[in-house]
Amino acid sequence: MALPTTAALLAGLGAGLPATGVQAAEKPAPDAPRNPHIASCRTDIEGSRVTAFCHNPYPGVDRVRLHVECARWWDIDTDSAPVEVGPTAYVELTQRCWKEVGNAWISHQPEPARP
């Protein structure tokens, strides 16, 4: 069995594979229509703890959830309860693993603006 070449490994990294084991993402599926009126969120991973900071500058309500996959097979993955982020509101969501975090992302359920 031949080992992959350096060029093949670099091509894999250029194809969107994470360079580190930890990835924070909030990308919609490629076929899904992008909704520009969702809360702006960012995730911060420190050791085994993940914190999401979300701000909604839009008139509609966005329901956000933090999802965390832990790196160890025996560590339990977690999903937060949905939290409503109203117009001009700000929320922080926190989850953790016992050991290392493997992946963390935020999901959105936007509602149309109320008249």
Image (cartoon, helix red, strand yellow):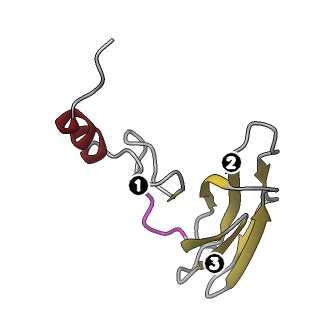
Q: Looking at the image, do the residues carrying marks 3 and 1 touch, with CB atoms under 8 Å apart?
A: no
Q: Is residue 37 magenta?
A: yes
Could you say where residue 89 lies in the image, as x and y percent from the top left? 67, 86
Q: Nearer the viewer, mark 1 or mark 2?
A: 2
Q: Amino acid at mark 2?
A: Glu
- Residue 74: % across, % down: 81, 38
Separation of residues labelled 3 and 2 (CA atoms): 18 Å
In the displayed structure image, the side of residue 86 where residue 81 appears, left or right: right
Looking at the image, which is closer to me, 14 or 115? 14
Magenta portion: prevailing SS class: loop
Q: Position of residue 90 (x, y in %)?
A: 67, 85
Q: Circle 3 sits on which residue?
A: 53
Please tell me which of labels 3 and 1 falls first in the chain.
Answer: 1
Q: Which residue is mark 1?
A: 34
What residue does disc 2 label? 69
46 sits to left or right of 8: right
From the viewer's perspective, is residue 100 above or below residue 94?
Answer: above
Comparing labels 3 and 1, the label whose residue is closer to the camera: 3
Q: CA distance from mark 3 to mark 1?
A: 20 Å
Amino acid tagged 1: Arg
